[in-house]
Amino acid sequence: MTDEPTTDGGSDADLTVYWHDRMLDHEQPAGAFKHPSTPIVAADETHPDRRERVENVVATVEHGFPEESRFVEPERASRETIERVHDAEYVDWLEGFCADGGGRIGRTTTGANEATYDAARVAAGAAVAAADHALSGRPGVPYALCRPSGHHAQPTQADGFCFLNNAAVAAEDALASGADRVAIVDWDVHHGNGTQEAFYDRDDVLLVSAHHDHGSWSEYHPQEGSLEEDGEGDGTGYTVNVPLPPGTGDRGYERLFDEVVEPIVRSYDPDLVLVSAGQDAGTVDPNGRNLVTRGGFRTLGSRVRDLSREVADDRLALIQEGGYQPSHLSFATLGVLEGVLDRLVDLEGYGHDDPMGWLDEPTELVDEWLDEAIDHHRAHWPIE
């Protein structure tokens, strides 16, 4: 692991959190966890994308970094900004669907209520504000605390609890504002398929997505996230998918950064680094099977901050994606922010540790999968 941050309260960067409580009003439909109701489940369970997730992250920031952080309410993303990524017909459908009360979208795991479209516009606006903050050179690490998440949302449809692709909208806005190249590092445990779809044939946005090998299913989620999906036309090589096996933990993600993320992003030399920061690779997440701890996320935060300093003049923005065990999401996100801000928070009763990190990583299996990914992507990038 990288060197531990300082514990003396000093910090070389402040934190600006783009957040609006309108995002709490979005609700997914009840059912059997994320699935539709069934007669064999007597009591419907709250959908995993529930408001407590981000309420807990707000508490994490307020308690962990009371002097280093400030909250800023973002403007809603405009239609013009949204339509740089999403087709107008889809945006019209989403607005109308929510105005009519929403509901579950077919038999998928995704649904909306009357507040979802507006909440999604606020979330996209938060991502745009964070990217603009990073490009402007203003002090403070920008963090868009987004709900709904965005990286599954495709240009023409919702997908995977996502409606507007926050990272893609932010990247497009950055390009429209003068950036030449944007790198998106997506460590959410699920494939950033919507982000991939938005930029698959282009070389002005690099996507590096590390995720479980879920594959594709139906027209709802056609992208596979496989090694072979590495772009087309001008975009060939600029989609870097890294499937990871269940059980990948702190050591595996550090090797991912050592041998894939850092050399590729360095070679790409972006003007801005965006992070699709989904902490559902955490050790007890119900929508993932990986084992990253608070300490592992601390390392990810530190590594991506150092990388952005090296290649993008410290132009870095974090954009919240998944993370569905509400308590562990707080520990995991605390770790990310500790790493980014170079500060350890000594939690009473917990210290610097993760109380939920107790399983061992299957090292040999993780290395086999990473070896395969490295071998594939070296056809396009200077990696060992």
Image (cartoon, grey):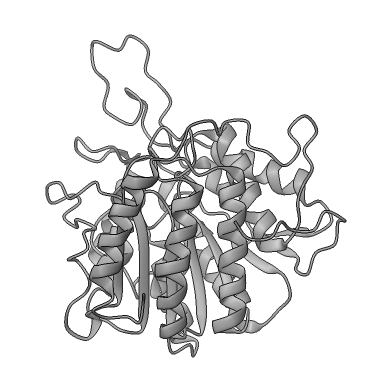
Report whether residue 346 is seen. yes
Residue 40 horizontal/vertical position (percent):
24, 10
> Which image quarter holds the N terminus?
bottom right
- Residue 223 vertical position relative to residue 201 in the rendered view, above or below: above
Quadrant of the rendered structure where residue 313 is?
Answer: bottom right
Q: Residue at x 50, y 70 (%)?
A: 274
> Which image quarter holds the C terminus?
bottom left
Is 319 in front, or is 157?
A: 319
Quadrant of the rendered structure where residue 350 is?
Answer: top right
Report whether residue 76 is seen. no
- Residue 99 vertical position relative to residue 108 in the rendered view, above or below: below
Q: Farthest residue in the front direction?
A: 364
Q: Farthest residue in the left direction?
A: 218
- Residue 151 vertical position relative to residue 107 in the rendered view, above or below: below
Residue 154 horizontal/vertical position (percent):
27, 60
In the displayed structure image, the side of residue 66 where residue 91 appears, left or right: left
Q: Residue at x 24, y 41 (%)?
A: 105
Quadrant of the rendered structure where residue 151 is?
Answer: bottom left
In the displayed structure image, the side of residue 13 where residue 180 appears, left or right: left
Residue 3 horizontal/vertical position (percent):
69, 60
Residue 281 horizontal/vertical position (percent):
45, 45
Is 350 in front, or is 13?
A: 350
Is 99 in front, or is 152?
A: 152
Is 379 in front, or is 13?
A: 379
